[in-house]
């Protein structure tokens, strides 16, 4: 049915997991419709990345390896994507709904005059056209959307689409490409803020803390549980607004959207604005002393009790498990 194009986002020479999710979903759709998958790789020239994409169903990678593109800049990256779209004429284009994808996708869509559906969580093909499922009104409802014209551009919510096991026989051809690297705004340096080492939006496990922890002096319980589980740390807006932790940790409508395999809400009531950012998590655990807390309506496992009794026990159990005892 033609070509599906994906954006292979990389950081420091390694492909982001969300890129592999996009490539895998494109490969599944291509298999079902009899098409092929191509990818755009910008800012890295690594043969290893091309080979890795090949094992995930990509048959051709357009590599913009210019060193001037190593750091993300909206304009040249959008130019590179638009250039490939114009040449390849894909029927659909997938980008991960990461910070970079959120910035890049609308620019690309505007450049090629195409429609964009963002934060998609499922796709089907009907009568040769793509249909996407995406949340609306902060996750209160899901909408099914269709595009007019082509290409049909979509961003994919991280951690929702599975990455198929790599097929060692899969091979991708690398096509060297170049683009005008001029940019009116460019990142010249980035400064780590001392945040968690695991990217919250892409984490497989997230432990989030809320006002039930009573004060910033107790937030270490969330951090210790997260460390013991190899999880990212999240927070409710109430504790961010109170200054316990930085806004980068906030999960919800006005924070980050997460979709981990396991989300543990510690002393979080489960307000609709919080649920908007985490309700698509695969397994949700709520720890709250109030049996009527709304978090229990979405939780797969509800632990009713005091966080100060339960969380230390969980930390101890997780640490023992990690140590193999
Ligand atoms: C426009 C708008 C946007 C918003 N965006 C966001 C957003 O992005 N993210 C977000 O999180 N919120 C957001 N909010 C705020 C949201 O409405 C809630 O106020 C907030 O999520 C509440 O945070 P919380 O659950 O930590 O606190 P609370 O609602 O105060 O809940 C604390 C919970 O802890 C429990 N608890 C207390 N003590 C204990 C204990 N010892 N052991 C166990 N449990 C205990 C209580 O039973 C309670 O359920 C937004 C609000 C608005 C209006």
Image (tube, rainbow, N blue to C red):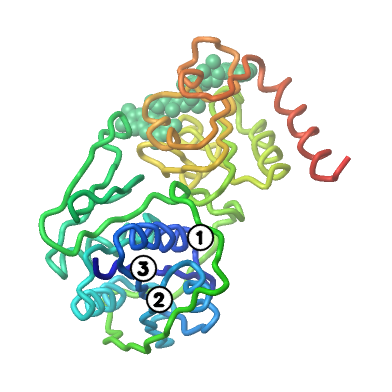
Residue 319 in picture, x, y percent from top left: 80, 40
In primary-sequence order, the first of circles 1 and 2 is 1
Of residues 141 and 245, which is closer to you in this image? 141
Assess disc 3: are there few (<14), some (14-19) or many (≥20) residues with their C-alpha within 10 Å of its C-alpha.
many
Image height of 221 relative to 197, above or below: above
Residue 195 in picture, x, y percent from top left: 57, 53
Quick check: is the Cβ at mark 1 less than 8 Å away from ligand 1? no
Q: Which residue is mark 2?
A: 59
Give the numbered dot on residue 7: 3
Asked whether disc 1 touches disc 2, contact meaning CB atoms under 8 Å apart, the reply is: no
Residue 118 in picture, x, y percent from top left: 28, 51
Classify the position of the C terminus by image quarter. Answer: top right
In primary-sequence order, the first of circles 1 and 3 is 3
Image height of 26 relative to 63, above or below: above
Classify the position of the N terminus by image quarter. Answer: bottom left
Give the numbered dot on residue 17: 1
Q: Secondary structure at mark 1?
A: helix
Assess disc 2: are there few (<14), some (14-19) or many (≥20) residues with their C-alpha within 10 Å of its C-alpha.
many
Residue at (27% x, 70% y) in the render? 3
């Amino acid at each position: 049915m033609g070509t599906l194009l994906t954006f292979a986002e990389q950081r420091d020479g390694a492909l982001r997991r969300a890129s592999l999710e996009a490539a895998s979903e494109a490969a599944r759709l291509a298999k079902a419709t009899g098409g092929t998958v191509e990818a755009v790789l910008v800012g890295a020239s690594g043969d290893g990345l091309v080979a890795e994409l090949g094992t995930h169903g990509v048959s051709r990678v357009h590599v913009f390896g210019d060193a001037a593109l190593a750091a993300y800049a909206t304009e040249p990256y959008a130019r590179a994507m638009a250039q490939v779209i114009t040449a390849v004429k894909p029927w659909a284009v997938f980008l991960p709904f990461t910070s970079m994808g959120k910035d890049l996708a609308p620019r690309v869509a505007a450049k090629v005059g195409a429609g964009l559906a963002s934060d998609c969580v499922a796709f089907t093909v009907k009568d040769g056209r793509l249909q996407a499922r995406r949340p609306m009104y902060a996750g209160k409802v899901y909408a099914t959307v269709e595009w007019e014209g082509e290409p049909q551009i979509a961003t994919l919510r991280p951690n929702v689409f599975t990455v198929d096991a790599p097929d060692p026989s899969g091979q991708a051809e690398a096509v060297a490409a170049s683009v005008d690297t001029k940019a009116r705004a460019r990142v010249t340096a980035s400064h780590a803020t001392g945040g968690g080492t695991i990217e919250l939006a892409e984490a497989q496990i997230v432990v989030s803390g809320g006002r039930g922890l009573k004060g910033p002096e107790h937030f270490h319980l969330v951090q210790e549980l997260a460390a013991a589980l190899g999880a990212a740390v999240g927070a409710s807006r109430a504790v961010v607004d109170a200054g316990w932790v930085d806004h980068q940790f906030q999960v919800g409508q006005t924070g980050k959207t997460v979709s981990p395999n396991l989300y543990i809400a510690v002393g979080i009531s489960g307000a609709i604005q919080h649920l908007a950012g985490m309700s698509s998590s695969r397994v949700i655990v709520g720890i709250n002393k109030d049996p009527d807390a709304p978090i229990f309506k979405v939780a797969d496992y509800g632990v009713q009790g005091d966080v100060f009794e339960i969380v230390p026990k969980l930390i101890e159990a997780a640490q023992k498990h990690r140590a193999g005892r």
